[in-house]
Image (cartoon, coloured by chain):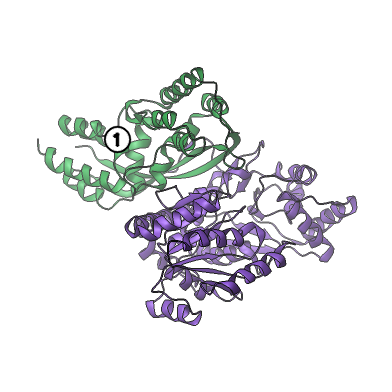
């Protein structure tokens, strides 16, 4: 099991000392996380890592998962899509069943001092507040920038009953009468996807996939769907290829909700069939070491998404000190300050221009990579995420812009 | 002899749910957001990119330059000399004056592309004590080498502009110790032009040079 002290060599002793000091102010309050899935997905991943670390810091934290049937999850999937801005039709009966499942769970659960509810599925548990009291926080992990109005109105009546709402990116905030806190997601530098790798492991992965490291390698790690714009990446690569002999690696899992996904994937494969320097890798979910190695061994890493929730793959690439070019969407501008810690682009042409610059100016590229790594170290590691959660719990019991805990 | 107790601070980012699409909306926002919002947008880069030199500009200047492509205005906003201001309301007025005078001289009102609007946010600060106390300048320099950059940040930036103590905490203590020259030299530093590690080294050097005077 990972210990909180294992992070000292990465973030320094004062940072870990501050976490212990903050945790002192949460002593005596029990924290209960509630979401809808124990495995799979980013929320379960971060909770499974964070809960043991919170407990090591002395915060009594537990994690409960609500129960629902298929009908419930069909409705919540519609909510999810609707919050992303996709047109959906949720019937009256579906809203009622959603509430019924929440009420059944609320009747079975026991609640702690701080109830930390994740995402829309368990949001209506807050109905218990009127008879239980306690402190309630709602944490939204999903893109909320252009929600369907009807679904938003339905959820808003519950959100407003919480003490605070937490969002992952500034664009997701709305005009609400309760405090809204920004807490970005994070990466774990000790996970298989991000830990240091010996050079021989990196070399082995590149050999395994027949990628030639004597020539520049540009890589994008992402699902093969429209929103990740793999065809735009190929167009940018082709513009660069007129001047530089490079290879393009497109690697990722195939799981996608995008109805255009199969068509996009077919076009990507057709392009790859015409050019041996376009390497397409469909990786199974257990490929964390391979992804880690591909990022570490690449000359430049791309994230040319058309839309992103947060885009944590950018943090993963920057943490490895890789010069990174990404589009200025979702949470990506939080991770990259243009020309300081990476490059932000808006077009295929801009992306190809910067790929050429970074390959031809390795010193500049290296500086961006070093700055990017430092930026992630200070702002997007799990230790910062724990700090933000502790401050969030403490904020429930204090008012004012400057809170004196001294 | 008086002691110096080192504090530290941690920040929480509060989302105000308000955004600006163009300069007119930016001006409206700057005029009536809380002071903790002006503080956030003028100090965020310092906190998040404290290792970078030259420092990226404040958030207002970054957005005006990178998103609205208003280079001259961006340069004027980034040149506001924050160290000259005694409180956040004065600083707010400086930004208002610059944006207002720009808008009076132009009919152009470029809009940010969808998704690149300016989002107003604010800082909520939590102050904590640390185990470190200095009874002398020698101890002060020793401690300064070990404290987190949050400690440095709190005593230099937060104390003067946000807590409106008139000058930074270190200079006030040096004055109490009867070291006016050292106090003046630290007060005259423009901390916004250093990385925080650079600032730490500069302070140590000033204490070594002027501490015995």
State left or right for residue A205 relative to residue B86.
right
Q: What percent of the width, then of the height, locates residue A152? A: 75, 44
Determine which quarter of the picture holds residue A266.
bottom right
Q: Nearer the viewer, residue A263 or A117?
A: A263
In the image, the chain rendered in green is B
Q: Nearer the viewer, residue B121 or A126?
A: B121
Q: How many marks?
A: 1
Quarter of the image with the N terminus of chain B in it: top left
Q: What percent of the width, then of the height, locates residue A254? A: 66, 70
State left or right for residue A139 relative to residue B93.
right
Quarter of the image with the C terminus of chain B in it: top left
Secondary structure of residue under mark 1: helix
Determine which quarter of the picture holds residue B97.
top left
* Residue A291 visible to an observer of this rendering: yes
What color does chain A have in the rendering?
purple
**Label 1 belongs to which residue?**
B169
* Residue A57 visible to an observer of this rendering: no
Q: Considering only vertical position in the picture, is A314 above or below A148?
A: below
Q: What percent of the width, then of the height, locates residue B70? A: 47, 32
Residue positioned 61% across, 53% down in the render: A306
Q: Nearer the viewer, residue A217 or B186?
A: A217
Q: What percent of the width, then of the height, locates residue B193? A: 30, 38
């Amino acid at each position: 099991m990972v210990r909180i002290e294992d992070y000292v060599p990465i973030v320094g002793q004062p940072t870990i000392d501050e976490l212990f000091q903050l945790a002192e102010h949460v002593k005596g309050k029990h924290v209960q996380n509630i979401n809808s899935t124990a495995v799979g997905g980013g929320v379960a991943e971060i909770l499974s890592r964070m809960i043991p670390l919170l407990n090591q810091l002395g915060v009594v934290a537990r994690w409960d998962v609500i129960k629902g049937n298929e009908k419930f999850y069909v409705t919540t999937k519609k909510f999810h899509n609707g919050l992303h801005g996709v047109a959906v039709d949720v019937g009256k009966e579906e809203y009622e069943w959603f509430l019924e499942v929440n009420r059944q769970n609320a009747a079975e659960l026991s609640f702690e001092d701080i109830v930390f509810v994740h995402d829309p599925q368990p949001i209506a548990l807050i109905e218990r507040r009127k008879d239980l009291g306690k402190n309630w926080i709602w944490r939204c992990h999903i893109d909320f920038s252009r929600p369907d109005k009807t679904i938003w109105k339905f959820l808003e009546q519950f959100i407003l009953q919480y003490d605070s709402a937490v969002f992952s990116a500034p664009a997701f905030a709305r005009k609400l009468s309760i405090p809204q806190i920004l807490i970005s997601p994070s990466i774990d530098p000790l996970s298989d996807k991000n830990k240091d790798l010996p050079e021989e492991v990196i070399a082995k992965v590149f050999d395994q996939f027949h990628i030639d490291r004597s020539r520049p390698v540009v890589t994008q790690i992402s699902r093969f769907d429209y929103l990740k714009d793999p065809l735009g990446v190929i167009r940018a690569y082709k513009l660069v290829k007129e001047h530089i002999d490079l290879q393009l690696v497109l690697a990722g899992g195939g799981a996608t909700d995008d109805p255009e996904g199969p068509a996009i994937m077919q076009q990507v494969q057709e392009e790859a069939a015409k050019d041996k320097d376009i390497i397409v890798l469909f990786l199974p979910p257990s490929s964390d070491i391979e992804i880690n190695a591909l990022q570490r061994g690449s000359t430049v890493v791309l994230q040319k998404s058309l839309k992103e929730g947060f885009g944590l793959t950018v943090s993963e690439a920057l943490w490895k000190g890789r010069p990174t070019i990404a589009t200025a969407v979702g949470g990506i501008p939080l991770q990259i300050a243009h020309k300081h810690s990476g490059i932000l682009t808006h077009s295929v042409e801009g992306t190809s221009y910067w790929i050429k610059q970074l390959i031809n100016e390795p010193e500049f590229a290296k500086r961006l990579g070093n700055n990017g790594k430092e930026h992630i170290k200070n702002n997007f590691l799990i230790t910062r995420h724990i700090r933000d959660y502790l401050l969030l719990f403490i904020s429930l019991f204090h008012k004012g812009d400057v809170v004196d805990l001294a | 002899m008086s002691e110096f107790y080192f504090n530290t601070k941690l920040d929480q980012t509060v989302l105000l749910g308000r955004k600006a699409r163009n300069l007119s909306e930016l001006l409206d926002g700057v005029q009536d957001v809380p002071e903790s919002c002006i503080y956030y947008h003028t100090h965020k880069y310092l906190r998040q990119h404290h290792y970078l030199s030259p420092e990226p500009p404040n958030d207002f200047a970054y957005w005006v330059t990178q998103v609205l492509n208003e280079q001259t205005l961006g340069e004027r906003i980034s040149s506001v000399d924050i160290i000259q201001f005694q409180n956040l309301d004065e600083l707010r007025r400086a930004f208002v004056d610059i944006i207002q005078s720009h808008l009076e001289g132009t009919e152009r009102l470029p809009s940010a592309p969808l998704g690149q609007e300016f989002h107003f946010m604010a800082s909520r600060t939590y102050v904590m004590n640390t185990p470190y106390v200095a009874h002398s300048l020698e101890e002060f320099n020793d401690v300064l080498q070990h404290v987190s950059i949050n400690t440095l940040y709190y005593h230099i930036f937060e104390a003067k502009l946000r807590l409106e103590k008139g000058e930074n905490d270190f200079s006030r203590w040096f004055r109490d110790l009867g070291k006016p020259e050292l106090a003046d030299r630290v007060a005259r530093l423009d901390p916004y032009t250093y990385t925080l590690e650079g600032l730490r080294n500069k302070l140590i050097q000033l204490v070594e040079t002027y501490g015995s005077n």
